[in-house]
Each structure stands twice: as structure tokens, then as C-alpha cells.
């Protein structure tokens, strides 16, 4: 039985359901996801950051992202790496996030 190959759009759609509890916009629009790589065997590599290394959800947020990605049909494994270089800054937010946070 061949599993359907997950798409980047499907992965992003799931990531967009994860919110930083202190900021009313999803982590993708906040610019916390640096890179998504989908391998032909269904393995997904994600490089992400947090708004700060002292983020109160530093333990739970990456786990939630990993679980959401794992729920996409065809994903066989998720390798999630949290990095702090380059450090996150407000310029990484999408226009949508800036609008939501009244930062335009």
C-alpha cells in the first residue's frame, strides 16, 4: 500500500493551527518556521525558532508542532529542530500577522 506524499501546503496548514499563547496569531505567520523539507519517504524536517529562548512554552510548543505535522496523511516521521540563530525578530512576521497585532 502506497501512502500519499504530503505537500508543503498541507504541512503549513497544520502548522497554522498552532498559536503562541501570548500572541493572537499562528506561529507560521509570526515567522517562527524557518524551513520545511519533505523527503520522498514521507519524513519531514522542520527548522523553527521561538520568539525568545526564555519562551514559557519552549517545551510544549515544538511538541505541538511535531504532533500537528505528524497528523498529515503520508507523514512517516518528523524531525523538528529548534534554533536561535538567526534570532527571531518582528521583521520576520508576515504582513497578516503585523495587521492582526496592529503593527503596520
Image: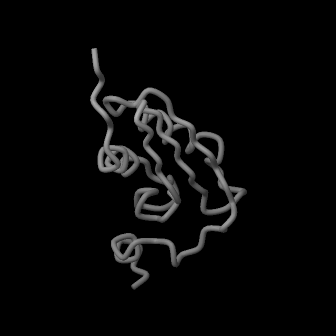
Q: Where is residue 51 in the image (x, y as percent from the top left)?
A: 60, 62
Q: Residue visible at 31% across and 48% down?
A: 13
Left or right: 39 as drawn, with respect to 90: left
Picture quarter containing residue 39? top left
Residue at 64% in and 50% down? 82
Q: In this view, does 51 lie to the left or right of 69?
A: right
Question: In the displayed structure, would residue 4 be above or below residue 58?
Answer: above
Q: Residue at x 60, y 57 (%)?
A: 49
Find the residue positioned furthest to the bottom.
104
Against 27, residue 1 (above or below) is above
State the count of labels: 0
In the rendered image, residue 79, in percent from the top left (x then y), is placed at 56, 37
- Which one is in front, 30 or 2? 2
| Left or right, residue 50 beside residue 30 | right
At 41% from the left and 63% from the top, the residue drawn is 29
Q: In which quarter of the image is the N terminus?
A: top left
Q: Is residue 55 above or below residue 97?
A: above
At which x and y percent is residue 85?
69, 64
Q: Where is residue 5 in the image (x, y as percent from the top left)?
A: 31, 34
Amino acid at each position: 500500500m502506497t501512502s500519499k506524499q504530503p505537500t508543503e501546503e498541507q504541512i503549513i496548514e497544520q502548522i497554522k493551527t498552532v498559536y503562541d499563547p501570548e500572541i493572537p496569531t499562528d506561529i507560521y505567520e509570526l515567522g517562527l518556521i524557518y524551513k520545511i523539507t519533505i523527503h520522498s519517504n514521507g519524513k519531514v524536517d522542520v527548522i523553527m525558532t521561538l520568539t525568545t529562548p526564555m519562551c514559557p512554552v519552549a517545551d510544549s510548543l515544538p511538541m505541538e508542532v511535531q504532533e500537528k505535522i505528524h497528523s498529515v496523511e503520508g507523514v512517516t516521521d518528523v524531525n523538528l529542530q529548534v534554533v536561535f540563530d538567526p534570532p527571531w525578530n518582528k521583521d520576520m512576521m508576515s504582513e497578516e500577522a503585523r495587521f492582526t497585532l496592529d503593527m503596520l
